[in-house]
Amino acid sequence: MSASPADLVRAFHRAFGLDARDVPSQVPPELAAQRGELLAEEAAEVAEVSVAGPLDRLAHELADVVYVAYGTALVHGIDLDAVIAEVHRSNMTKLGPDGRVTRRADGKVLKGDHYRAPDVAAVLRRQGWNPDSG
């Protein structure tokens, strides 16, 4: 069985002496800004190749976005897998009890009456986050 993205990125951060926290917390503004810039760079690269390809480059850029996102979560001490699971739980409530899906004209799945927002704060509290400390 292969390692999860979180495990792989943690190994990278440890090998290169990069920040990693075990409990969700705020980071210094300079570090937060750096992580935001890295994410923006990677997202821009995805946008650039998503239409024109080639597919192998798109796959690479998508992987880079995920890698940097997991790294940013690690820097903040966030178990991103748990947050993704909570967002997934919430997204699945967009499906109506009759199994029907409501879509916007461009195909985006919309929230229906049965939608329940994710409780990301609860996930972070289970990870040790104290909202009063940042």
Image: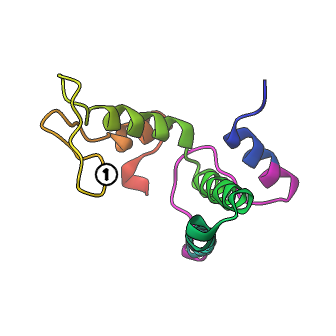
The quarter of the picture where the N terminus appears is top right
Residue toward you, 50 or 28: 50
Does residue 45 sit above or below 108 in this rendering? below
Q: Is residue 120 left or right of residue 115?
A: right
Q: Is residue 98 left or right of residue 127?
A: left
Q: Where is residue 80 drawn, in percent x and y?
A: 55, 43
Q: Residue at x 59, y 74 (%)?
A: 48
Q: Where is residue 85 drawn, in percent x and y?
A: 46, 33
Q: Residue at x 32, y 40 (%)?
A: 118
| Secondary structure of the residue carrying numbered label 1 | loop
Q: Is residue 8 left or right of residue 128?
A: right
Specify whether residue 17 is painted magenta.
yes
Q: Which residue bears the numbered disc 1?
A: 108
Find the magenta span and give its range. Answer: 12-32
Give the overall secondary structure of the magenta segment: loop
The quarter of the picture where the C terminus appears is bottom left
Q: Where is residue 16 drawn, in percent x and y?
A: 85, 59
Q: Residue furthest left?
A: 113
Residue toward you, 31 or 84: 84
